[in-house]
Each structure stands twice: as C-alpha cells, then as structure tokens.
Image: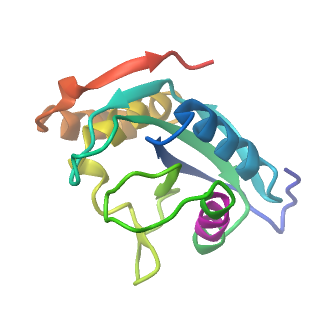
Amino acid sequence: MSTSSAEPSVYAYIGLGSNMGDREQYLRRSLELLAERPGVRITRQSGIYETEPVGFVDQDPFLNMSAEVETTLPPEGLLDAMLDVERQLGRIREIRWGPRTIDLDLLLYGQAERSSDFLQLPHPRMLERAFVLVPLIEIAAARDPALAEWLHEHLEKLDRKEGVCLWKKAQ
C-alpha cells in the first residue's frame, strides 16, 4: 500500500467468518483478495476460532477470525471492497445469519462513528458476540491495549464464550 501525506491511513478491524466448504481457505482467500486492493494492507491476523452458529442454528459450525488493516480508503470504500470480496467468493444472502462461504464485517474504523442504512460503526452487535470479541481482543491488544481491555470487559459479561474454541493459532 502506498500512502502519501495527502492520504492519511487509519487502522480498521474486520471480523471474518465461514461455515461452508473449505472454511479456512475462504478466510485466507478473502484476506488475500482484500490485500490486493489499492489502499488496503493487512497488518495483523488473529488465530482461527471454531464456533457454533448464532441466530439460525441449523447449520455447520463457523470458523471465525479478525484482521487489522491499515487503509487509506474511507469507511464506506473499505466496506465496498469487503462486499466485493464476499461476492467474488460466492457469498449469497438468502437466510439472515444463515450458512455462508464468507462473511466480512467492518467492526471498527479508527475512532469513526457512522449510522446509516449502509454502514454502522462501531459494528452494532460486536459487543454481544463472543465469536467476534475473542479474536478481536487478540489482535487489538498489540496496537491498543486500552481498547483490548474495554473489549475484554464486555466479553466477560457474555454467555457462550466457552463455545469459542481456538482452532488454529495465528501464523
């Protein structure tokens, strides 16, 4: 990623999930495709965690992880890039919280706050989901220990956190 003084970069955090086909390959490929975008650089990845589905529970377990990206894209541009990666990897939105090849959620974008039909920042349900918080805390701790501690406080209040099991350590 090339940046200049006219293009300030921001650190953003993305949640990833897959429960169809080669789940790990979908996670890895989505990060590769995202990193190919101008203005996006993957700077940190969490381990991969296996979790039971939430919401629509009659489906296979998920693999979940988080990634930190450095980007010069605005939040809406980063979200557009993420949605395009989902389409490239065959994401079909049929059942809310249903099975998917890949799901990419923009969790945090620096300190930005947004509330529109298209984008909400911070992600409106991230503090309610252990499968989001566990890998997010893992990578946030390196750049922002205060953020990681705040996220951990929310994690401690949740049920089902024992259902988030490390599947593969970060590489």
Between residue 6 and residue 80, name the one nearer to us: 80
Q: In the rendering, at what x and y percent does residue 52 appear?
A: 27, 35
In the displayed structure, 43 sits above or below 92; it is above
Most common secondary structure along the magenta stretch: helix
Describe residue 71's horizontal placement relative to residue 170 as left or right: right
In the displayed structure, 153 sits above or below 57; it is above
Describe residue 47's horizontal placement relative to residue 6 as left or right: left
Quadrant occupied by the C terminus: top right
In the displayed structure, 138 sits above or below 109; it is above
Describe residue 156's horizontal placement relative to residue 145 as left or right: left
The boundaries of the magenta stretch are 78-85
In the displayed structure, 93 sits above or below 53; it is below
Between residue 16 and residue 7, name the one nearer to us: 16
Describe residue 30's horizontal placement relative to residue 4 as left or right: left
**Rendered residue at 21%/46% (across/down):** 57
Q: In the rendering, at what x and y percent does residue 80 appear?
A: 63, 71
Between residue 58 and residue 159, name the one nearer to us: 58
Q: In the rendering, at what x and y percent does residue 49 appear?
A: 41, 27
**Rendered residue at 40%/68% (across/down):** 94
Between residue 116 and residue 2, name the one nearer to us: 116
**Rendered residue at 83%/69% (across/down):** 6
Image quadrant in which you'd find residue 68: top right
